[in-house]
Amino acid sequence: MNTRYKDLIEQTFDFPQAEFHTEKNNLFFHNIDIMELVNQYGAPLKFTYLPKISENINRAKQWFSNAIEKHNYKGTYNYSYCTKSSHFKYVLDEALKNDIHIETSSAFDIDIVKALKNEGKLKDNAYVLCNGFKRDQYIANIISLIDGGHSNCIPIIDNYEELNLLLDETKSKFKVGIRIASEEEPKFEFYTSRLGIGYKNIVSFYEREIANNPQVELKMLHFFINTGIKDNAYYWNELLKCLKVYINLKKVCPSLDSLNIGGGFPIKNSLAFDYDYEYMVDEIINQINKACEEAKVDVPHIFTEFGSFTVGEASGAIYEVLYQKKQNDRERWNMINSSFITTMPDTWAINKRFIMLPVNKWNDKYERVLLGGLTCDSDDYYNSEQHTNAIYLPVYEKEKPLYVGFFNTGAYQETIGGFGGLQHCLIPHPKHVLIDINENGKLTTKLFKDQQKSEEFLSILGY
């Protein structure tokens, strides 16, 4: 009878997988011995494997290159990274090795862009696509880029007032895009996105506000839906509606030459994850090509803004199971030495799933458990609602520590969790380690940030 945890995983999933395998009872992630990482740095621990960022960027570039060649598509593909997914310098430094562009969403993003330009990391001809709702500081920072000669800084107009706010601040000529206010899924709480301008109003807005203004050149139409790029009727319907707007706008606006299809590529959230990226890219290029050919207009250059897809699969979090509480006949609570609310806030806020696997004890027997965090908050837990299946882990033994890993946590968790600031119940943020490959092909590790200390919390609190 197979009762080992390893047997359970191998019988339930196709395992090992590209990024996961086991050796001598322990888990490896991209050939990183996670237990060795724990032995060196301790737990709780967060880590980022930098080469995965470049790998995903180049995977997407190859998919689009293949589709463009297959369909004889006359436009180019441009990969942009939306910084809100993770603003950390180590992320931008790695991503920008791959000839990409940047999408911003707030005023301070522009300060990051300037810092990267000053270091020579961001090229002067790189596109800086400025999304989001813009007010005084954001407008001023965008204009400082434009007036400073960054000609490919393109503010994406979100509402009717923004164009005039930009014009009031500069005499320079500049390019703009317009964001479509896409319709949300029928089950959503509201019908239309709060971001952008309605489908039916975009052509008239262009003719009224931009067409006769020699200072402004419309270059881009921006399309993004909240649920991301999925192979379902809703996504394809919204894409076709977007293409109708592009075609109608292109017929009256010769300068329009780019279509931004936003972001939203999913990332792996379970060992059973199945998504055909190459098919989706191929079909998107095919649909755009066909629609433009039928309308007899030039196809647009394609832009994407991949955030989670760029950085999400590069990171993980490791916790130690401190204790097991048996609350009744059925529920065993494995208490971790950190907090889900503070270190992986999406598990608490939106019931987001991550890949959860033990780091060690793969050859031990397993049991069904719940995972609880350290805060005195009833919502600080991770269970089958997020994990889609019941959680099974190697049997807890007090004398043999069990470590649990959560993988593909690299997008949004640090910024939403308030990295470096106050944490719920003053539970410290774990230390963070960067993992890279040196010129000799060997893994290297570097401590990016140590675990928070009480003095940091007390200083913020005014003590």
Image: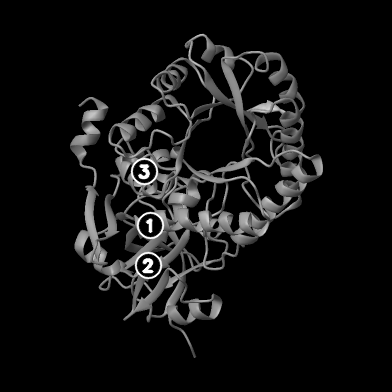
Q: Residue furthest top?
A: 168
Residue at position x 40%, y 28% in the image: 110
* Mark 1–mark 2 CB contact (< 8 Å): yes
Which of disc 3 and disc 2 is earlier in sequence?
2
Position of 462 relative to 267 (above/below): above
* Mark 1–mark 3 CB contact (< 8 Å): no
Tell me residue 64's x, y (percent). Answer: 58, 54
Residue 372 showing in the rendered view:
no
Between marks 1 and 2 in the image, the one whose residue lies nearer the viewer: 2
CA distance for labels 1 and 3: 18 Å
Tell me residue 217's x, y (percent). Answer: 59, 22
Label 2: element kind:
strand
Label 3: element kind:
helix
Residue that numbered label 3 is attached to: 92
Position of 302 relative to 61 (above/below): above
Q: How is the image coloured?
A: one colour
Residue at position x 34%, y 39% in the image: 423
The label number, if any, that marks residue 29 in the structure image: 2
- The residue type indicated by label 1 comes to Gly
Q: Residue furthest bottom?
A: 1
CA distance for labels 1 and 2: 9 Å
Tell me residue 280's x, y (percent). Answer: 65, 56
Q: Which image quarter is the C terminus in?
A: top left
Residue that numbered label 1 is attached to: 316
Q: Residues within 10 Å of mark 1 (few under 14, many from 20)?
A: many
Position of 190 relative to 141 (above/below): below
Q: Residue furthest right?
A: 294
Which of disc 3 and disc 1 is earlier in sequence?
3
Q: Could you tell whether 313 is left or right of 259 in the image?
A: left
- The residue type indicated by label 2 comes to Phe
Between marks 1 and 3 in the image, the one whose residue lies nearer the viewer: 3
Label 1: element kind:
strand
